[in-house]
Image (spheres, rainbow, N blue to C red):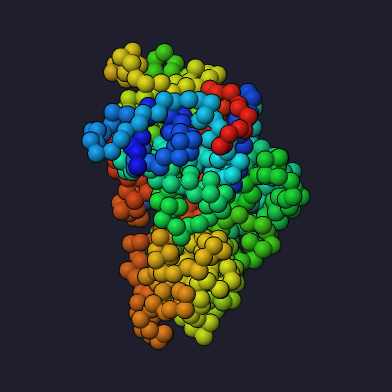
Amino acid sequence: MIRYTYDGTFDGFLSVVFYIYEKKLPPSSIIPDGEYQTDFFSETVFVPTDISKAMRVENSLTSKIGNIGFGQIISAFSCGFEPENKDLKIFDFIRLVLRVGGDACKMYHLHTVSDFYSLVLKTDKEAQHMQGFLRFKSLSNGILAAEYSPDNDITHFLTSYFSRRNSENKFIIRDTIREVYGLYNGSEWTVVPGTPQLSSVFEDLVYSEKELVFRDLWQQYYDTVSIASRRNERQRTQFMPRRYWKYLTEIVI
Amino acid sequence: MTLKEKFRVLTEGAKYDVSCSSSGSSRGPQKGKIGLTNVGGVCHSFTADGRCISLLKVLMTNNCIYDCKYCVNRTSADVPRAMLMPEELCEIVMGFYERNYIEGLFLSSAVFRDPDYTMELLLRTVTLLRKKYRFGGYIHMKAIPGASPELIEQAAEIVDRMSMNIELPTSTSLKLLAPQKKKEAITTPMRQLSDLYDEQKNAPSRSRTLIPAGQTTQMIVGATPDPDGVIIRLSEGLYRKFAMKRVYYSAYVPMGDPSLLPLTPPNLLRENRLYQADWLLRFYGFEANELVPVNYNLPSDIDPKSDWALRNMDKFPVEVNDAPYETLLRVPGIGVKNAWRIREARKYTRLDIDDLKRMRVVLKRAKNFLTVNGKFYGGSLNTDVIHSLLVMPEYQKAPSEQLRLFPEESPTLAAAHRNRLLSESAHESLTGEF
Ligand code: SF4
């Protein structure tokens, strides 16, 4: 059994999958390089990222489980929970797919499948939440800026989504946990690791004049639209967990 | 009055309409437009009363010529009156939308001067929003009772969803509490909208141009003595005859004319039971007749599906591995998603109790109605015993109507990631192991 490491990217992970099948050497674990201490008792192999091999794995998976199924693999990979076991769980699922084909996605009774879907669900749920909960503020230079602290690595998803939703505005999204930034210049989007220049955008925020007007109207709307006699704090926090409140314009803590 | 103050008054007047959903329409980004729609809808926030904010819900004006007794905007009510200019409203919608506060607009109005005048005002506003402000997001617009069919059709071409509120479930109640509103003023446009919707029913949802998200309506519960049996039968008829997308139920909040209406606080549990029964009609294959006799209310101590099952114990227990899908749907505790998963998974194996647990089937209630691979895991088949097990302190657990129990389709990350991957690396032909 071999311990595999790679550069932490999705293509890197798919390269590991390719390597394992090529060498026929099953993994004891798959972990991004440098994340955990070396284990002296098992052999460690670092697999370099190879885009063309990654693409072959992707094509093969897509032909079996379609774009939706492949998207779920990406979701599972983006999941921020269970960092030590996550990659291995995804690998187990991929192995099942390669063995039985598309049916794997419906074998809900198997551990492999239910473990895999619980990763997918965590990511997709947060991504869906943030489609609604992310808040942009307009800066004096015309750019919209949003900050958030997600549990999962979903900035690429959100950047892509908002580039379609807000196609005419330049914007910047900051994941404060991973220090990665989603950028959109009005025609193309990208996700990049943080730099001092990017983080400085969020240090001295200079808002546009309109920003304060809209914030004020929105806060009033939020307070007014609630029906006082039906107050239900439990339900509010159930649907909108408190850890998201920090960045919500409408909630003044 | 300042803009902020007007906006407050018109939010106040709109908030008792509980519909806020932005679902049912899926329009991708269009060139030259700002915004898109998501088929499952998106919740942007939750209010202190636990309800989803998806759309900016506001009245054009709360100046009303009518005097519906239950309504906060009735002529005789002593409230400040205001009116927004179309431009003012469009500016707010765009400002809110680009900050991601909202998914779109739910525009409604009191009846100002006459129905056609009001309808024209709404129409002018949404046209401005679509044309001048190039807004491509979600618009839900209220159809004004009594407005001419031409105006209704024009609106249907612009907006995603329209609604006409029935408000009161019987003509007797309507006569008493909304004497100026004729039943026909509500049902005629409903019929018209359902015909318009039907005409393009078979077109794929993306190419539908008339109200792609269909029509909805709302009924107030508890303002009149009308029982649940009447309400649920009316809903069933609306779903069948008018292709209604949703019927909303709103527990009456005492704000109407106190001489004709109850002063008691809203019965949220009753509202919740009606929503449960409504789900059973729409997604579980139940008929109103099976759920509650016409002159009765739904039971409050247990949910309507459990209630039905207890009255039909001769049909249970059913075997999880053999029962048809339709029967699984009728087992208390098993939802659409679980029934679907069971149906798929049992093709590969004979399911046992551990399989079900891994599939996250909650067995607490279901086990009393099932055998799993021949074994019964419930405590008893005695109706009274099971009944006592099913009673739950549900009042606090009442899900809001906006709770998306069955998201119509959840967006996956697939599209986004794939685009990235495809743009970064060239396609390779399939060779070798893969
Ligand atoms: S028509 Fe009736 S329900 Fe509508 S705003 Fe006027 S008083 Fe209220």
> Considering only vertical position in the picture, is A169 above or below B209?
above
Q: Which of these two is toward me, A175 or B190?
A: A175
Q: Is residue B377 visible?
A: yes
Residue that lies at the very extreme toward the right in this rendered image: B199
**Which residue lies at the image location 53% right of the left edge and 45% below the top edge?**
A98
**Which residue lies at the image location 41% right of the left edge and 74% below the top edge?**
B367
Residue A54 in the image, given as x and y percentages of width and height: 51, 30
Residue B139 in the image, given as x and y percentages of width and height: 58, 39
Quadrant of the snapshot with the C terminus of chain A: top left
> Considering only vertical position in the picture, is B289 above or below B16?
below
Q: Is residue B227 visible?
A: no
| Residue B289 location, quadrant | bottom right
Q: Which of these two is toward me, B201 or B340?
A: B340
> Considering only vertical position in the picture, is B34 above or below B27?
above
| Residue B174 location, quadrant | bottom right
Quadrant of the snapshot with the N terminus of chain A: top left
**Which residue lies at the image location 64% right of the left edge and 49% below the top edge?**
B214
Q: Is residue B232 left or right of residue A110?
A: right
Q: Is residue B160 left or right of residue B373?
A: right
Residue B262 in the image, given as x and y percentages of width and height: 41, 66
**Which residue lies at the image location 37% right of the left edge and 49% below the top edge?**
A239
Residue B268 in the image, given as x and y percentages of width and height: 40, 62
Q: Is residue B382 left or right of residue B292?
A: left
Q: Which of these two is toward me, B299 or A101?
A: A101
